[in-house]
Amino acid sequence: MKNLPIEDLIERARILTEAMPYINAFRGAVVVIKYGGHAMIDEDLKRTVIQDIVLMELVGMKPVVVHGGGPEITALMKKLNLQPKFVEGQRVTDAETLEVAEMVLAGKLNGEIVNSINQTGGRAVGLSGKDGGLILASKLGAGEDGTADIGFVGEVESVHPRIISILTENQFIPVIAPIGVDRNGQTYNINADSVAGAIAIALKSAKLILLTDVKGIYRDPKDESSIMPTIYTGEVEGLIEKGVITGGMIPKTRGCVEAIRKGVGKTHILDGRVPHSLLLELFTDRGIGTQIIP
């Protein structure tokens, strides 16, 4: 630091000054972050995401983290000689697969993220949807209308966020594994994007941020320079019909629209492969990725 040229120090000061109005605007705001994709695998990206989350809390925001873990579940299944199966992108989850999923999500990965936040200067607490009755789930699809029965895959029926609020009001960072339970005590594995959206709605969060492995939404899916910085909720279905929004981005964008219509301030789809993508979106004039707004 002492050997840096004065120009570099001035640039750092300018960056801090640029961030000031955003820090002021978001002080006390709840921000739900869906943490997944390459940012959970690459060690350097892991570090920058964790640093961003800790800094958010230090400047007065209330980050809430919901994490995925699909690749890690698949890797452990293969080690155990269990063959992963998917139907339309959804993991077929029998009793053995569910046991592995809960072990990876609520055990290994959740603990690793909590530990990383704590080692970086934050105070994190790990949760799954079972804790404090956080997520009431029900079976997804259940074979209705000819859809395949894919086992113990659930959807969020309701969220009871009191335990999250208790933690954030006391400067803890909740880290949530996407596991829920139904009224009969049956455990379900739930899509992490869906859990993040449902929690954001329950908390009436200022922002819902989805970290992905793409730059955002492209007007021309074949041209990465055609990124759309802003999409309004009323445009989404038309963009789906035109083939602009396709594949796995369809449920993400529809989830963002639902979140906004139910009280979330703004939603963002960010490229988690970019170091410090959260800070770039939250605290700079330019921002990155695609925001979906009312």
Image (tube, rainbow, N blue to C red):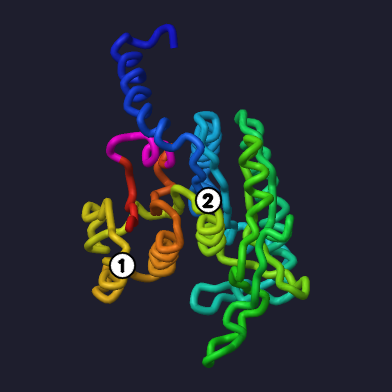
97 horizontally vs 235: left or right: right
Residue corresponding to mark 1: 236
Quadrant for the N terminus in the image: top left
Q: Please report the residue visible at 22 percent of the width from the left and 55 percent of the height from the top.
A: 226
Q: Using the image, determine if residue 288 lies above or below residue 231.
A: above
Query: In this view of the protein, which residue sits in the foreground, 182 or 261?
Result: 261
Counting from the top left corner in percent of width and height, residue 179 is at: 66, 62
**Mark 1 / mark 2, whichever is N-terminal:** 2
What residue is drawn where x is 49% and y is 78%? Answer: 88
Q: How many marks?
A: 2
In the picture of the structure, the residue carrying the numbered disc 2 is 35
Q: Position of residue 140 (x, y in %)?
A: 59, 78
In the image, residue 100 sits, relative to residue 264, either above or below, namely: below
Q: Is residue 93 left or right of residue 199?
A: right
Q: Is disc 1 placed on a helix, strand or loop?
A: helix
Label 2 element class: strand
What stretch of residues is rendered in magenta?
278-286
